[in-house]
Amino acid sequence: MANGADLERVVRASGDDTIIDVWVVPGARNTEVVGVHGDALRVRVAAPPEGGKANQAAERILRQILGVRPVLEAGRSSRRKQLRVAGLSPGEVVDALRKHLAGSR
């Protein structure tokens, strides 16, 4: 499980928005946020990597956790992605992720 310091490494401010560095693992058994992988948030998705399905699944689970829709900023065809979250500060994103990870134990 990621602690607050780990989560703070994967988010950063970008103007009024927040960027989340994400490592997506497609083809997993379940779709879930599992913690920090190096310097990125590790998200497993059940969707395959074809046709943007894994990207959509990652956006969908983060929308559920954060309450706002993240937008893919970079990494469309890579496991390493950057997602932009409008209207939330890095601290708010970290708090939401921390609460989610604590509740998923």
Image (spheres, rainbow, N blue to C red):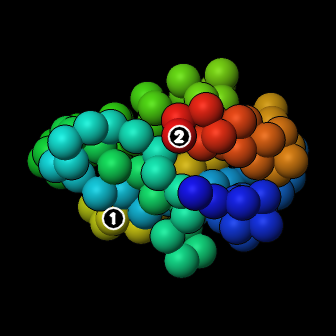
Rendered image quadrant of residue 46: top left
Task: Report crowding for label 1: few under 14, some 14 to 19, many 20 or more residues within 10 A (C-alpha).
Answer: some
Residue 51 in view: yes
Q: Amino acid at mark 2?
A: Arg
Mark 1 and mark 2 residues within 8 Å of each other at the beta carbon: no
The residue sitting at 79% across, 41% down in the picture is 95
The residue where tag 1 is placed is 79
Percent across and percent down for residue 16 are 86, 44
Percent across and percent down for residue 81 are 46, 61
The residue sitting at 60% across, 42% down in the picture is 101
Rendered image quadrant of residue 80: bottom left
Foreground: disc 1 or disc 2: 2
Left or right of residue 24, residue 53 in this image:
left
Q: Which residue sits furthest bottom?
A: 38
Left or right of residue 84, residue 38 in this image:
left
Percent across and percent down for residue 6 are 70, 67
The residue sitting at 54% across, 77% down in the picture is 38
Looking at the figure, which quarter contains the N terminus? bottom right
Q: Amino acid at mark 1?
A: Arg
17 vs 7: above or below:
above
> What kind of element bears circle 2?
loop
Residue 76 in view: no
> What kind of element bears circle 1?
loop
Q: Which mark is residue 103?
A: none
The residue sitting at 21% across, 48% down in the picture is 28
Rendered image quadrant of residue 100: top right
Among numbered discs 1 and 2, the one appearing first in the sequence: 1
The residue where tag 2 is placed is 105
Task: Report crowding for label 2: few under 14, some 14 to 19, many 20 or more residues within 10 A (C-alpha).
Answer: few
Percent across and percent down for residue 52 are 24, 43
